[in-house]
Image (spheres, rainbow, N blue to C red):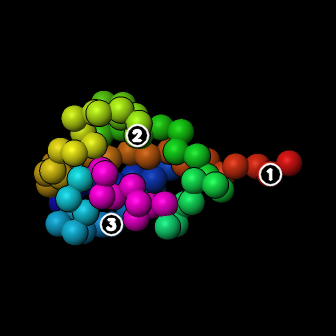
Amino acid sequence: MAILEVNSTQINFDEKSHFNLKSLIPKLQKNFPFDQYTFSNLKMNGESVELNDDNFYLTKPFDHNDVIQISINEINNQ
């Protein structure tokens, strides 16, 4: 089973219903909307992934050995 870590906390997810990072990010946005949170660091298998790039890992189908690490910070509205 692929591992998803958000701010170093493991979160269970169904890798079959979230085929790749491109399909997983919208699910995370429901819990962490971009207007309230920033995705400051996204890694898959130790490789940095930029959301706005044509990165291989955005569309690569999840494998049961994959490790997805995401750092999310709350935006301070000051």
In the visual, does 54 lie left or right of 60? right
Q: CA distance from mark 2 to mark 1?
A: 23 Å
The residue that disc 1 covers is: 77
Q: Is residue 38 left or right of residue 47?
A: right
For the residue pair 32 and 2, the one nearer the viewer reads as 32
> Could one spot residue 52 in this view of the protein?
yes
| Mark 3 lies on residue | 12
Label 3 sits on what residue type?
Asn
Nearest to the eye among marks 3 and 2: give it: 2
Picture coordinates of residue 6, whole percent (x, y): 45, 53
Image coordinates of residue 60 in percent, x first then y, are: 18, 44
Which secondary structure lies at badge 2?
A: loop
Q: Secondary structure at mark 1?
A: loop
Q: CA distance from mark 3 to mark 2?
A: 21 Å
Q: Which residues are magenta?
A: 21-29
State the residue at coordinates (80%, 51%).
Answer: 77
SS of the residue under disc 3: loop
Residue drawn where x is 57% and y is 60% of the image: 33
Q: Residues within 10 Å of mark 2 (few under 14, many from 20)?
A: some
Give the amino acid type for the residue marked by disc 1 in the picture.
Asn
Q: Say how many tags the image has.
A: 3
Q: Residue at x 54, y 48 (%)?
A: 72
Three-letter residue code for mark 2: Leu
Placement of the N terminus among the 4 image quadrants: bottom left
From this view, report whether residue 58 is shown above or below residue 32: above
> Dot 3: few (<14), some (14–19), or many (≥20) neighbours within 10 Å?
few
* Percent x, y of residue 35: 64, 55
Left or right of 62 in this view: 9: right
- Residue 51, disc: 2
**x 49%, y 60%: residue:** 29
